[in-house]
Amino acid sequence: MCSLLPEPGVFDDTLDIVFPGNFPSEAFWFTADAFIQQGGVNLSYGAALEAAFNVEQPVDGDQISFARIRIRVDLTTPGSYTITHPYGVEVVAVTTADIGTNGVGAINLTRDIGIGAPGVYTGALGGDIGPFLRSLNGPYTETNPTTGASERFVGDPNLTEAVTGSPFDTNYVRIQGPNGIDLRTELFAVSGKLSTVQLSTPLIVERSTYSRSTDENGAPVQSQDVFVQAPPPPGSAHFVDSAAGTIEMTEANRTGNWYGQSDAGPTPLANLAITADNSLATPPNPPTTLNSPLVDQVTIGQAQYSLASGQLLVVASTSDQTAPPGLSASVATSGAALGPLSGTEALKTLNTVVGPIPPARVTVTSANGGSDTEEVLILP
Protein backbone atom coordinates (compact mmCIF):
# COMPACT_ATOMS: atom_id res chain seq x y z
CA MET A 1 0.00 0.00 0.00
CA CYS A 2 3.06 2.24 0.01
CA SER A 3 4.82 3.94 -2.92
CA LEU A 4 8.45 3.01 -2.32
CA LEU A 5 10.91 1.98 -5.02
CA PRO A 6 14.10 -0.02 -4.48
CA GLU A 7 17.38 1.92 -4.60
CA PRO A 8 20.41 -0.35 -4.98
CA GLY A 9 22.94 0.38 -2.27
CA VAL A 10 20.49 2.64 -0.41
CA PHE A 11 17.17 0.87 0.07
CA ASP A 12 16.15 -2.75 -0.40
CA ASP A 13 12.36 -2.97 -0.43
CA THR A 14 12.47 -6.70 0.40
CA LEU A 15 13.92 -5.94 3.85
CA ASP A 16 12.53 -4.09 6.86
CA ILE A 17 12.86 -0.31 6.79
CA VAL A 18 15.60 0.66 9.25
CA PHE A 19 17.11 4.10 9.79
CA PRO A 20 19.98 4.27 9.28
CA GLY A 21 20.89 1.27 7.18
CA ASN A 22 17.93 0.57 4.92
CA PHE A 23 15.89 3.68 4.31
CA PRO A 24 14.68 5.26 1.03
CA SER A 25 16.02 8.63 -0.08
CA GLU A 26 12.43 9.72 -0.68
CA ALA A 27 9.10 8.62 0.74
CA PHE A 28 5.55 9.89 0.51
CA TRP A 29 2.86 10.81 2.97
CA PHE A 30 0.47 11.09 0.01
CA THR A 31 0.51 10.46 -3.74
CA ALA A 32 -2.05 10.77 -6.53
CA ASP A 33 -1.10 9.74 -10.06
CA ALA A 34 -3.10 9.86 -13.28
CA PHE A 35 -2.39 9.22 -16.96
CA ILE A 36 -3.89 10.10 -20.34
CA GLN A 37 -2.72 8.34 -23.50
CA GLN A 38 -4.91 9.19 -26.45
CA GLY A 39 -4.88 11.05 -29.76
CA GLY A 40 -1.19 11.86 -29.81
CA VAL A 41 -1.23 13.05 -26.20
CA ASN A 42 0.76 11.22 -23.53
CA LEU A 43 0.18 12.90 -20.15
CA SER A 44 1.39 11.92 -16.71
CA TYR A 45 0.20 13.75 -13.59
CA GLY A 46 1.47 13.48 -10.07
CA ALA A 47 0.49 15.22 -6.84
CA ALA A 48 2.43 14.36 -3.70
CA LEU A 49 3.43 15.34 -0.20
CA GLU A 50 6.99 14.10 -0.03
CA ALA A 51 9.62 13.35 2.59
CA ALA A 52 13.20 13.51 1.35
CA PHE A 53 16.74 14.57 2.22
CA ASN A 54 18.58 17.75 1.32
CA VAL A 55 21.58 15.87 -0.14
CA GLU A 56 19.32 13.16 -1.63
CA GLN A 57 20.79 10.51 0.65
CA PRO A 58 19.26 9.32 3.96
CA VAL A 59 21.36 11.26 6.45
CA ASP A 60 20.03 12.07 9.92
CA GLY A 61 19.52 15.81 10.42
CA ASP A 62 19.15 16.41 6.68
CA GLN A 63 15.41 15.67 6.41
CA ILE A 64 13.18 17.96 4.33
CA SER A 65 9.59 17.91 3.09
CA PHE A 66 7.72 19.51 0.20
CA ALA A 67 4.45 19.50 -1.72
CA ARG A 68 4.76 18.60 -5.40
CA ILE A 69 2.69 19.02 -8.55
CA ARG A 70 4.29 17.42 -11.61
CA ILE A 71 2.79 17.38 -15.11
CA ARG A 72 4.62 15.95 -18.11
CA VAL A 73 3.04 15.76 -21.55
CA ASP A 74 4.28 14.45 -24.89
CA LEU A 75 2.63 16.37 -27.74
CA THR A 76 2.77 16.73 -31.51
CA THR A 77 1.07 20.12 -31.91
CA PRO A 78 2.26 23.51 -30.62
CA GLY A 79 -0.22 25.97 -29.11
CA SER A 80 -1.84 26.97 -25.84
CA TYR A 81 -2.81 24.13 -23.52
CA THR A 82 -4.98 24.27 -20.40
CA ILE A 83 -4.60 21.49 -17.86
CA THR A 84 -7.20 21.27 -15.10
CA HIS A 85 -6.40 19.04 -12.15
CA PRO A 86 -7.64 18.49 -8.60
CA TYR A 87 -5.44 21.25 -7.16
CA GLY A 88 -5.66 23.96 -9.80
CA VAL A 89 -5.40 24.98 -13.44
CA GLU A 90 -2.20 25.33 -15.48
CA VAL A 91 -1.99 27.22 -18.79
CA VAL A 92 1.09 26.40 -20.85
CA ALA A 93 2.22 27.85 -24.19
CA VAL A 94 3.94 25.11 -26.21
CA THR A 95 6.24 26.25 -29.02
CA THR A 96 7.59 24.39 -32.02
CA ALA A 97 10.93 24.25 -30.22
CA ASP A 98 9.22 22.58 -27.26
CA ILE A 99 7.82 19.93 -29.58
CA GLY A 100 11.29 19.25 -31.03
CA THR A 101 11.72 16.17 -33.16
CA ASN A 102 9.49 13.80 -31.23
CA GLY A 103 7.34 15.87 -28.88
CA VAL A 104 8.63 14.12 -25.77
CA GLY A 105 8.43 16.39 -22.73
CA ALA A 106 6.82 19.25 -24.64
CA ILE A 107 5.25 20.18 -21.31
CA ASN A 108 7.46 19.52 -18.30
CA LEU A 109 6.09 21.26 -15.21
CA THR A 110 7.28 20.55 -11.69
CA ARG A 111 6.31 22.75 -8.75
CA ASP A 112 7.93 21.83 -5.43
CA ILE A 113 6.80 24.05 -2.57
CA GLY A 114 8.20 24.00 0.95
CA ILE A 115 11.83 22.96 0.58
CA GLY A 116 13.61 24.80 3.37
CA ALA A 117 16.31 24.22 5.92
CA PRO A 118 16.72 20.59 7.00
CA GLY A 119 14.34 19.79 9.84
CA VAL A 120 11.86 22.53 8.91
CA TYR A 121 8.69 20.89 7.61
CA THR A 122 6.12 23.69 7.70
CA GLY A 123 6.90 25.00 4.21
CA ALA A 124 5.08 22.10 2.57
CA LEU A 125 1.85 23.40 4.11
CA GLY A 126 2.05 26.34 1.69
CA GLY A 127 1.98 24.06 -1.35
CA ASP A 128 -0.88 23.01 -3.59
CA ILE A 129 -1.69 19.75 -1.82
CA GLY A 130 -4.75 19.60 0.38
CA PRO A 131 -7.18 18.20 1.16
CA PHE A 132 -5.88 14.74 0.31
CA LEU A 133 -7.65 12.92 -2.50
CA ARG A 134 -9.16 9.60 -1.47
CA SER A 135 -10.66 6.69 -3.36
CA LEU A 136 -14.43 6.54 -3.61
CA ASN A 137 -14.05 2.85 -2.77
CA GLY A 138 -11.90 3.45 0.30
CA PRO A 139 -10.68 3.60 2.87
CA TYR A 140 -8.81 0.31 2.52
CA THR A 141 -7.73 -1.75 5.51
CA GLU A 142 -4.57 -3.86 5.51
CA THR A 143 -2.69 -5.79 8.18
CA ASN A 144 0.80 -4.59 9.00
CA PRO A 145 3.00 -7.68 8.47
CA THR A 146 5.40 -6.60 11.23
CA THR A 147 3.02 -5.52 13.99
CA GLY A 148 -0.14 -7.39 13.01
CA ALA A 149 -2.14 -4.19 13.51
CA SER A 150 -4.88 -3.12 11.11
CA GLU A 151 -4.01 0.04 9.19
CA ARG A 152 -6.23 2.14 6.95
CA PHE A 153 -5.35 3.88 3.69
CA VAL A 154 -6.98 6.55 1.49
CA GLY A 155 -6.53 4.30 -1.54
CA ASP A 156 -4.60 1.45 -3.11
CA PRO A 157 -1.76 2.67 -5.37
CA ASN A 158 -2.04 -0.58 -7.32
CA LEU A 159 -5.52 0.41 -8.52
CA THR A 160 -6.82 3.31 -10.61
CA GLU A 161 -10.11 4.58 -9.23
CA ALA A 162 -12.39 7.59 -9.06
CA VAL A 163 -11.56 9.91 -6.18
CA THR A 164 -12.99 12.72 -4.12
CA GLY A 165 -11.41 15.52 -2.12
CA SER A 166 -10.49 18.20 -4.67
CA PRO A 167 -10.93 21.65 -3.07
CA PHE A 168 -12.26 22.87 -6.44
CA ASP A 169 -14.51 19.87 -7.13
CA THR A 170 -12.24 18.97 -10.06
CA ASN A 171 -11.63 15.33 -9.24
CA TYR A 172 -10.10 14.72 -12.66
CA VAL A 173 -7.25 15.66 -14.97
CA ARG A 174 -8.25 17.37 -18.21
CA ILE A 175 -6.12 18.73 -21.04
CA GLN A 176 -7.51 21.15 -23.63
CA GLY A 177 -5.56 22.48 -26.57
CA PRO A 178 -5.48 23.35 -30.28
CA ASN A 179 -7.43 21.49 -32.95
CA GLY A 180 -10.15 20.54 -30.49
CA ILE A 181 -7.98 18.58 -28.09
CA ASP A 182 -10.12 17.89 -25.02
CA LEU A 183 -9.20 14.78 -23.05
CA ARG A 184 -9.76 13.84 -19.43
CA THR A 185 -9.46 11.05 -16.91
CA GLU A 186 -11.17 10.57 -13.58
CA LEU A 187 -9.01 7.61 -12.56
CA PHE A 188 -6.17 8.00 -10.06
CA ALA A 189 -3.83 5.75 -8.16
CA VAL A 190 -3.72 7.22 -4.65
CA SER A 191 -1.72 6.31 -1.58
CA GLY A 192 -1.63 7.58 1.97
CA LYS A 193 -1.99 6.05 5.40
CA LEU A 194 -4.76 7.37 7.62
CA SER A 195 -3.50 8.65 10.94
CA THR A 196 -4.74 7.02 14.11
CA VAL A 197 -4.23 10.25 16.03
CA GLN A 198 -7.60 11.79 16.78
CA LEU A 199 -7.76 15.38 15.58
CA SER A 200 -10.95 17.34 16.00
CA THR A 201 -12.67 18.56 12.85
CA PRO A 202 -11.30 22.00 11.90
CA LEU A 203 -13.86 24.77 12.33
CA ILE A 204 -13.59 28.54 11.91
CA VAL A 205 -16.61 30.69 12.75
CA GLU A 206 -16.67 33.68 10.43
CA ARG A 207 -19.92 35.27 11.52
CA SER A 208 -23.01 34.73 13.66
CA THR A 209 -25.35 37.70 13.30
CA TYR A 210 -29.03 38.47 13.58
CA SER A 211 -31.44 40.97 12.10
CA ARG A 212 -35.00 41.87 12.98
CA SER A 213 -37.59 44.34 11.73
CA THR A 214 -41.25 44.38 10.66
CA ASP A 215 -42.87 44.29 7.25
CA GLU A 216 -45.49 46.71 5.93
CA ASN A 217 -48.18 44.85 7.85
CA GLY A 218 -46.30 44.96 11.13
CA ALA A 219 -45.39 41.27 11.04
CA PRO A 220 -41.92 40.40 12.35
CA VAL A 221 -39.11 39.76 9.87
CA GLN A 222 -36.14 38.15 11.56
CA SER A 223 -33.17 35.89 10.91
CA GLN A 224 -30.10 34.36 12.50
CA ASP A 225 -27.25 33.95 9.99
CA VAL A 226 -24.16 31.81 10.54
CA PHE A 227 -21.08 31.53 8.30
CA VAL A 228 -18.25 29.07 8.97
CA GLN A 229 -15.30 27.40 7.30
CA ALA A 230 -15.12 23.62 7.73
CA PRO A 231 -14.32 20.54 5.62
CA PRO A 232 -16.63 20.06 2.62
CA PRO A 233 -18.95 17.07 2.16
CA PRO A 234 -19.01 14.31 3.22
CA GLY A 235 -18.36 16.63 6.17
CA SER A 236 -21.37 18.41 7.64
CA ALA A 237 -22.11 21.50 9.72
CA HIS A 238 -25.05 22.69 11.79
CA PHE A 239 -25.87 25.14 14.56
CA VAL A 240 -28.38 25.45 17.36
CA ASP A 241 -30.17 28.80 17.18
CA SER A 242 -31.17 30.94 20.15
CA ALA A 243 -34.59 29.26 20.17
CA ALA A 244 -32.94 25.81 20.57
CA GLY A 245 -33.68 24.78 16.97
CA THR A 246 -31.08 22.76 15.05
CA ILE A 247 -30.24 24.27 11.66
CA GLU A 248 -28.40 22.22 9.02
CA MET A 249 -25.95 24.33 7.04
CA THR A 250 -25.28 24.37 3.28
CA GLU A 251 -21.82 24.18 1.70
CA ALA A 252 -20.70 26.03 -1.45
CA ASN A 253 -19.30 23.79 -4.20
CA ARG A 254 -16.77 21.93 -2.05
CA THR A 255 -14.97 25.14 -1.05
CA GLY A 256 -15.41 24.54 2.68
CA ASN A 257 -17.58 27.64 3.07
CA TRP A 258 -20.83 26.90 4.94
CA TYR A 259 -23.95 29.00 5.58
CA GLY A 260 -27.12 28.49 7.57
CA GLN A 261 -30.12 30.64 8.48
CA SER A 262 -32.81 30.39 11.13
CA ASP A 263 -35.99 32.49 11.09
CA ALA A 264 -36.58 32.03 14.81
CA GLY A 265 -36.77 35.10 17.00
CA PRO A 266 -33.19 36.03 17.96
CA THR A 267 -31.89 36.50 21.48
CA PRO A 268 -29.07 39.06 21.27
CA LEU A 269 -25.71 37.86 22.65
CA ALA A 270 -26.98 34.29 23.10
CA ASN A 271 -24.23 31.73 22.53
CA LEU A 272 -24.94 29.60 19.46
CA ALA A 273 -23.45 26.09 19.48
CA ILE A 274 -21.92 25.53 16.03
CA THR A 275 -20.74 22.04 15.05
CA ALA A 276 -18.63 20.70 12.18
CA ASP A 277 -18.25 16.95 11.65
CA ASN A 278 -15.76 15.38 9.22
CA SER A 279 -15.76 11.89 10.73
CA LEU A 280 -17.13 10.28 7.56
CA ALA A 281 -14.04 11.39 5.65
CA THR A 282 -11.47 11.03 8.42
CA PRO A 283 -12.64 8.48 10.97
CA PRO A 284 -12.26 8.31 13.93
CA ASN A 285 -11.72 12.07 14.22
CA PRO A 286 -14.49 13.62 16.34
CA PRO A 287 -16.68 16.63 15.49
CA THR A 288 -15.91 20.09 16.84
CA THR A 289 -18.40 22.39 18.55
CA LEU A 290 -17.69 26.07 19.17
CA ASN A 291 -19.87 28.66 20.89
CA SER A 292 -20.29 31.98 19.11
CA PRO A 293 -22.28 34.96 20.41
CA LEU A 294 -25.25 36.09 18.32
CA VAL A 295 -24.59 39.76 17.56
CA ASP A 296 -26.22 42.42 15.45
CA GLN A 297 -24.67 43.50 12.16
CA VAL A 298 -23.29 47.03 12.26
CA THR A 299 -22.74 48.95 9.02
CA ILE A 300 -20.89 52.26 8.79
CA GLY A 301 -22.55 54.19 6.00
CA GLN A 302 -20.47 57.36 6.31
CA ALA A 303 -17.19 58.30 7.97
CA GLN A 304 -15.73 61.64 6.94
CA TYR A 305 -13.52 64.36 8.39
CA SER A 306 -13.40 68.05 7.42
CA LEU A 307 -9.91 69.56 7.54
CA ALA A 308 -11.42 73.04 7.61
CA SER A 309 -13.65 72.52 10.65
CA GLY A 310 -12.05 69.53 12.37
CA GLN A 311 -15.46 67.86 12.39
CA LEU A 312 -15.71 64.08 12.22
CA LEU A 313 -19.03 62.71 10.96
CA VAL A 314 -19.88 59.05 11.49
CA VAL A 315 -23.20 57.55 10.38
CA ALA A 316 -23.89 53.89 11.13
CA SER A 317 -26.78 51.49 11.46
CA THR A 318 -27.64 48.27 13.26
CA SER A 319 -29.50 45.29 11.83
CA ASP A 320 -31.73 45.33 14.92
CA GLN A 321 -34.53 47.68 13.85
CA THR A 322 -36.97 46.31 16.43
CA ALA A 323 -34.98 47.28 19.54
CA PRO A 324 -31.99 49.29 18.29
CA PRO A 325 -29.05 49.02 20.71
CA GLY A 326 -26.67 51.86 21.46
CA LEU A 327 -23.71 52.43 19.13
CA SER A 328 -20.37 53.99 20.02
CA ALA A 329 -17.39 55.04 17.90
CA SER A 330 -13.67 54.71 18.55
CA VAL A 331 -10.35 55.17 16.76
CA ALA A 332 -9.69 51.83 15.08
CA THR A 333 -5.95 51.73 15.66
CA SER A 334 -5.82 52.82 19.31
CA GLY A 335 -9.31 52.09 20.59
CA ALA A 336 -9.60 55.66 21.90
CA ALA A 337 -13.24 56.57 22.43
CA LEU A 338 -14.83 59.09 20.07
CA GLY A 339 -18.26 59.04 21.67
CA PRO A 340 -21.74 57.50 21.38
CA LEU A 341 -23.82 57.86 18.25
CA SER A 342 -27.14 59.62 18.75
CA GLY A 343 -30.59 58.61 17.55
CA THR A 344 -33.37 56.32 18.70
CA GLU A 345 -33.77 54.41 15.43
CA ALA A 346 -31.48 51.86 13.80
CA LEU A 347 -29.60 54.64 11.95
CA LYS A 348 -27.47 56.75 14.30
CA THR A 349 -25.02 59.66 13.94
CA LEU A 350 -21.94 61.08 15.64
CA ASN A 351 -20.72 64.59 14.82
CA THR A 352 -17.73 65.65 16.91
CA VAL A 353 -14.56 67.72 16.77
CA VAL A 354 -11.35 65.69 16.53
CA GLY A 355 -7.79 66.99 16.44
CA PRO A 356 -5.07 67.73 15.76
CA ILE A 357 -5.27 65.11 12.98
CA PRO A 358 -8.09 62.87 11.78
CA PRO A 359 -8.19 59.14 12.53
CA ALA A 360 -7.29 56.92 9.59
CA ARG A 361 -10.09 54.49 10.44
CA VAL A 362 -12.99 54.38 12.85
CA THR A 363 -14.79 51.47 14.49
CA VAL A 364 -18.44 51.52 15.51
CA THR A 365 -19.42 48.98 18.17
CA SER A 366 -22.92 47.97 19.23
CA ALA A 367 -24.10 47.22 22.75
CA ASN A 368 -25.34 43.96 21.22
CA GLY A 369 -21.87 42.92 20.12
CA GLY A 370 -21.69 43.85 16.45
CA SER A 371 -19.01 46.12 14.99
CA ASP A 372 -17.74 47.60 11.75
CA THR A 373 -14.52 49.39 10.81
CA GLU A 374 -14.08 51.75 7.87
CA GLU A 375 -11.52 54.22 6.53
CA VAL A 376 -12.27 57.90 7.08
CA LEU A 377 -12.85 60.03 4.00
CA ILE A 378 -10.86 63.27 4.26
CA LEU A 379 -12.56 66.43 2.99
CA PRO A 380 -11.09 69.96 2.55
Image (spheres, rainbow, N blue to C red):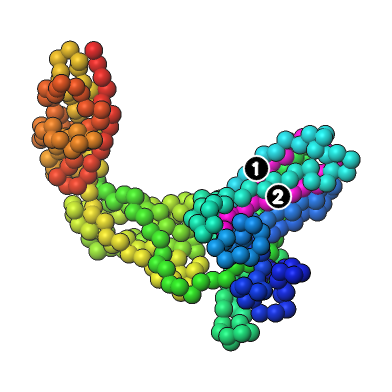
Does residue 57 belong to the magenta stretch? no
Which residue is nearer to you in this view: 240 or 292? 292
The circle on residue 71 is 2
Q: Residue at the spot x=36%, y=55% of the render?
A: 204
Percent x, y of residue 365: 19, 40
- Image quadrant in which you'd find residue 118: bottom right
Q: Neighbour class for label 1 at 10 Å: few (<14), some, many (≥20)?
A: few
Q: Residue at the spot x=77%, y=47% of the render?
A: 73
- Which stretch did the figure color magenta? 64-86
The circle on residue 90 is 1
Q: Amino acid at mark 1?
A: Glu
Percent x, y of residue 154: 59, 69
- Image quadrant in which you'd find residue 214: top left
SS of the residue at dot 2?
A: strand
Specify whether 210 is left or right of 339.
Answer: right
Q: Nearer the viewer, mark 2 or mark 1?
A: 2
Percent x, y of residue 172: 66, 54
Q: Are marks 2 and 1 in contact (CB under 8 Å)?
A: yes
